[in-house]
Image: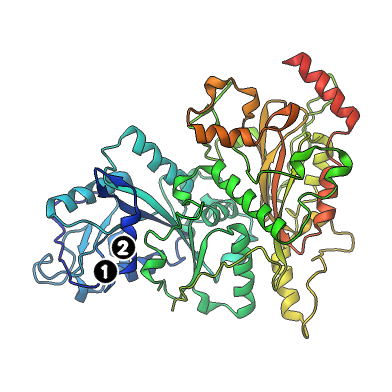
Amino acid sequence: RSSLPTESVHLVHMDAEEPAAKRLRADEPQANGEALVPVTLLSGFLGAGKTSLLKHLLENKAGLKVGVIVNDVAEVNIDKALVSAKASGGGGSSLQEDTVELQNGCACCSVAEEFLQSIEKLMELSHSRGVRWDHIVVESSGVAEPREIRDNFRNAKISQPDLLKGTALHTLVTVVDASTFLKEFEKRNKVNQRTDLGTNDFSETNNRQVVDLMCEQVECCDVLVMNKVDLIGDAELSLLKETLSNLNPLAQMHTSERGRVELASILAAAKISGGVGSVAGMDEDSEHRRIVQRVKEHDHSHGAAPSESAGKHGYGRSEQHDHGHGAHVAAADKQEHGRSDHGHSGHAHKEDGHTCDGTETCKENDHGHEDGHGHGHGHGHGHGHNHDENADGRHAKRFGITSFCYQRRRPFHPHRLMSVIKQLPVRQESLALSEALVKDQQKAGPSSTTDSVKTGATASPMTSLIRSKGFLWLSNSHSQIFYWALAGKHFELTQYATWWECLSRNEWPDDEVEVNDIMRDFDGEFGDRRQELVMIGVNMDREAITGLLDKCLLSDTELDAYRKHWSTSD
């Protein structure tokens, strides 16, 4: 597509009381004494309602000057009566094939080959016209990965500072289709099989599970918009809210019909104060650290035991008095040692891991070590209301969806862990979510929701899980972090990065804050090695799940053998 022509947009100043969304810009970081223009990234599958939201945003009457970069201007279908007559030659139509200018000073253009170049063009246009943008909004493709876009933005700021001069990625917004989300969450399909959800240059070869991408879009955002709520009933909406507020307990949540949401709820809406920063300024490790801290804070505030059975196994103080920080690890370089960029995309090592989506037989890989610590990886996987809907998403509410963090300071025996992985709900036709909805709809009257959702008389407590993720320490790998990820019916166990304990200090970041975060994860003889899994499920039997995982840990005798083996191997 052609890039934005500099002569194409005529900005019209409108006298209006400065709206809240405009005042937010004053809180942004300064560049040469001038506030940066906040950029909002809009994600969500095709059909979720992003286009309707953008149309509502562009036609605003609040006096905001918003530059919007979309995949296709024609699809936005802006009211011709609102298009600038001067810019369109009096005809009230599009000025050029890839740009529309509105009388309110907003402009909408089709994305160039690289969206970063489109932002640069918008800023050049703003300077040439002498009128600043209040906001820039970028629409991602339906199957785009928000973490990748965020990381590209951050890397460009470092490697090509002039390209994004005067701007700052501020807020990540995800729009979900309330009428289909729960159904899609329980499906087994891949991105390249679902062109109806969106396409991009890589979608034809994208084998990623749709449910995994759904979780990323929900978890990697500051604002969640549940659109099309008019198409579902009260029970399904309640279940959706509980689900989303546990997947991302720190996101601001809003409901909408036809994409109508107050602008201040979307534009630069991320909360930067109160010790909680925007997802835009994080990497995947920071996100994990934040969710672990939030889940544990909730446990402490509600009197839950930080970690059942921790004391009886003598796992050390870290299980009972953790600092509330998650993994402070970064991406494993493709080289043999080290990390790159102090961050991780989360998908760079899928070829090293094992996946299961319920369509294939889960098998055990056994690569034994001479000391008897086998190498086994799991294959068991798989009309707007604009108030904050997420007061405390982790409370057991109507459907009993809760979360907790499992943390231990000794390695798992891979063979025993395999037996737990095989109990995950990857082969079930229906998950705990849909069963909870059926159960709710079948109720004759109020009743307790404390009984676990079961799929059979001897159902494993692991079948109550709908999402779990985090870092593993396996006895057959002293240096390697493994990443555990369950999303719906899909499970993966992949190589992630190297424990900081195994890296020389010259491979650590230079930033003192980052180093302090890393050191908070160190405890005892094994440094930062640990188990750290966030569990999210419906009416979970936390004690039973914890017990199953504890049985996979090395015994004291096995731990002594582990020490001996790796001390001679180092």
Image location (x, y in percent) of residue 428? 75, 58
The residue that appears at 57% across and 77% down in the rendered structure is 232
| Mark 2, residue position | 23
Above-or-below relation of 307 to 238: above
Image location (x, y in percent) of residue 142? 44, 56
Q: Quadrant of residue 565?
A: top right
Whether residue 296 sits left or right of residue 316 in the image: it is left
The residue that appears at 70% across and 46% down in the rendered structure is 533
Image location (x, y in percent) of residue 111? 30, 51
The residue that appears at 31% across and 66% down in the rendered structure is 76
Asked if disc 1 and disc 2 are in contact, CB closer than 8 Å, the reply is yes
Q: Quadrant of residue 153?
A: top left
Q: Secondary structure at mark 2?
A: helix
Front residue of 367 and 105? 105
Above-or-below relation of 332 to 385: above
Q: Residues within 10 Å of mark 2 (few under 14, many from 20)?
A: few
Quarter of the image that includes the C terminus: top right
- In this view of the protein, can residue 481 be seen by the observer? yes
Q: Residues within 10 Å of mark 1 (few under 14, many from 20)?
A: few
Type of amino acid under label 1: Glu
| Mark 1, residue position | 18
Type of amino acid under label 2: Arg
The label on residue 419 is none
